[in-house]
Amino acid sequence: MESYFERAKLKFENLKNKTDVIVLGIESSCDETSVSVVRNGTELLSNVVSSQIDIHKRFGGVVPEVASRNHVMAIENVFNEAVKEAGIKLSDIDAVAVTYGAGLIGALLVGVNFAKALSFGLDVPLIAVSHIEGHISANYITHKALKPPFICLLVSGGHTALLKVSDYLEHTMLGTTIDDSVGEAFDKVARILGLEYPGGPNVDKFAKLGKSNIEFIKHDILKGTLNFSFSGVKTAVINYVHNLEQKGESVNVPDVAASFQSFVVKELTEKAISACKQTGLKKLVVAGGVSANSYLKERLTELCKENNIELYMPELKLCTDNAAMIASAGYYYIKKGKGLAGLDLTGSATVAL
């Protein structure tokens, strides 16, 4: 008698050549519980997200144990809603794709274990998806005609990098952060300014009310490379705020937010354009939660137009963590013959870029 994995392996091989593939995706790496159904990597049938923002707001950030418990409570209902919204039968699902990393290990395990049980119960292949590949794949849903090669600016809470994407799931790193990720810097600056969680959107919001008139540090850090550094500007903002507080002076939060954001966006945009010029690629794809930043989108739109570069950014609902991007990535894993996992799959706090 064939084992589940032997059957899954055979079905996985057959899916490579199937013209119509429906993948159910599961995402639980941080504080969003999400399940989505995507056809052929680009057609979004459903994408249900249960956010824990209001739960973690009072703590000023994500509490891992609280996140895990809330994933457990939410995931079954989110799954049922996603299947209903997609208008499919469970027997229509060809594969289950799940984020196995990077993320909070307890949170990841909720999604991974649910995915293992589901794939076993449906007798379909289980696909282990990198959260990073998911963020890149979100663009294939928004921009159905998009195909590699292209330059990808990855900007998230855990990663900041410039990647040359030569094919689906195949990329080389051109540059990365040598310290903090851009999302981490946004969150820490938001906290020192007394802004609510999530920090990034609130820095963006207050920056619109201020002027970029404070020079925290010079822009010549790592000049001539495609690497990033954000710990210096983050520390400079913290010291600036502390110095004002020690003198009993008030902090102009909008101006600090605008000045910090201006510095960060200048670093990201200039190096992204440089990467396009150095490689000769005329397509720039942005991926990750920070792609929701309005000023980043504004500046990239302007610079790409000036340099005749095509800009691709995910629609707002696909910028932050969601299962649609995981289901999309799962489709490309199948087509490339990658990612097939057994019932021994576990979560991983980190994954290689």
Image (cartoon, grey):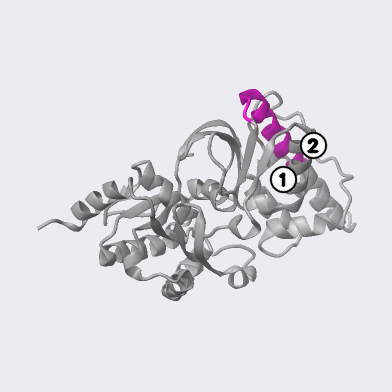
Residue 191 shows in the view? no
Q: Seen from this angle, which residue lies furthest left?
A: 1
Task: Give the total number of marks visible in the rendering.
Answer: 2
Query: In this rendering, would 59 be left or right of 15?
Result: right
Q: Nearer the viewer, residue 309 or 116?
A: 309
Q: Residue at x 32, y 55 (%)?
A: 126
Q: Which residues are magenta?
A: 263-281
Residue ID for mark 1: 234
Residue ID for mark 2: 217
- What kind of secondary structure does the magenta stretch mostly adopt? helix
Query: In this rendering, would 347 be left or right of 222?
Result: left
Q: Seen from this angle, which residue lies furthest front?
A: 19
Residue 203 shows in the view? yes
Quadrant of the image occupied by residue 25: bottom left
Q: Is residue 266 magenta?
A: yes
Circle 2: element type: loop
Q: Residue at x 51, y 60 (%)?
A: 44
| Residue 253 locus on image (x, y percent) | 83, 57
Q: Is residue 130 above or below residue 225?
A: below
| Residue 29 locus on image (x, y percent) | 48, 58
